[in-house]
Amino acid sequence: MRHKKINEVKTIFNKISFSYDFLNNLFSLGLHKSWKKKLVDLLKPIDGENWADLCCGTGDLSFLILKKVSPNGKVMGIDSAKEILNIAMKKSKSIKNKCIAWEMKDIFEIDENLRKYDGICMSYGLRNLVNVEEGLKKVFRLLSDRGRAGFLDFNHSKFYSMADIFQKIYLRFIVVPISKIFKLSEEYSYIEKSIKNFPDGNKLCQIALSVGFKNVEYRTVFWNQMGILILHK
Ligand SMILES: C[S@@+](CC[C@H](N)C(=O)[O-])C[C@H]1O[C@@H](n2cnc3c(N)ncnc32)[C@H](O)[C@@H]1O
């Protein structure tokens, strides 16, 4: 079951990688960039720090973090899907960046005894992991003693709330039909299923406290469509 989900997720992201940035911009009308900036502002990375962008995809967050930790800090972008990571690497080469290292790896295979980060960020990754609690535990162990982590993802709204209804209509009648044009409707149908299985903000905070984080904060953005979770050790 675990392996099936890992492979399913990897296949999805390898397959959609070439249209990923384009469709992301289209479906969010470019707004995902401002939500990512908001996440980075809340995390306050500073020059000289060592950060990891887990489930980095095409690297949006890695590039935003790099601006804050430069010139003395570094960023590592990690993702398990080869094709999507290749796109991040190409972008990185085109800006002649030398301070982001890219690694193809499942986040659960990162050796926490060898690596400690001042900060970890993840956008639209937590919901795709085989197990959210295990993911937060892993992040906790990968952070240095005073480290912090931030996550941006879809918000799992209350069943039948306005936000829930809007989200479903939007995914079913806009996202899936448009992605059909790109022969990716099956892959994009996965979003609704993954949100259904994703804990809501309160539950995410409870899980984070239970794995050891001292300070947890969850806020929603864009009329409760997205959520940002900020955790401090
Ligand atoms: C929706 S994309 C998000 C990409 C990027 N962070 C963004 O915001 O655009 C989710 C990414 O998580 C990666 N992913 C899922 N599970 C993973 C795991 N266990 N280890 C590493 N990467 C994983 C997928 O390959 C995919 O690139």
Image (spheres, rainbow, N blue to C red):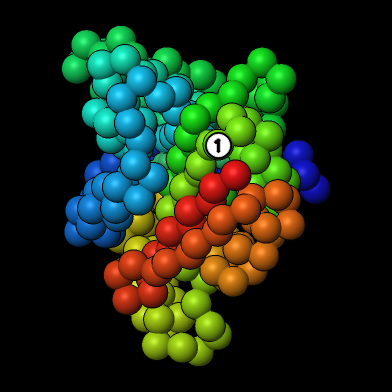
Residue 224: x percent and y percent? Answer: 38, 74
Q: Residue furthest right?
A: 1
Q: Which residue is mark 1?
A: 146
Quarter where residue 7 is shown: top right
Kindly identify the residue that appears in the image at 48 percent across and 64 percent down: 218
- Residue nearest the viewer, comparing 62 with 94: 62
Kindly identify the residue that appears in the image at 43 percent across and 59 percent down: 228
Q: Is residue 76 above or below residue 84?
A: above
Quarter where residue 220 is shown: bottom left
Residue 209: x percent and y percent? Answer: 67, 58
Residue 189: x percent and y percent? Answer: 49, 61
Amino acid at circle 1:
Arg
Residue 55: x percent and y percent? Answer: 50, 37
Q: Residues within 10 Å of mark 1 (few under 14, many from 20)?
A: few
Q: Secondary structure at mark 1?
A: strand
65 lies left or right of 25: right
- Residue nearest the viewer, comparing 179 with 117: 117
34 lies left or right of 60: left
| Quadrant (top left, top right, bottom left, bottom right) of the C terminus | top right
Q: Is residue 145 visible?
A: yes
Q: Is residue 193 visible?
A: no
- Residue nearest the viewer, comparing 180 with 55: 55
69 lies left or right of 30: right
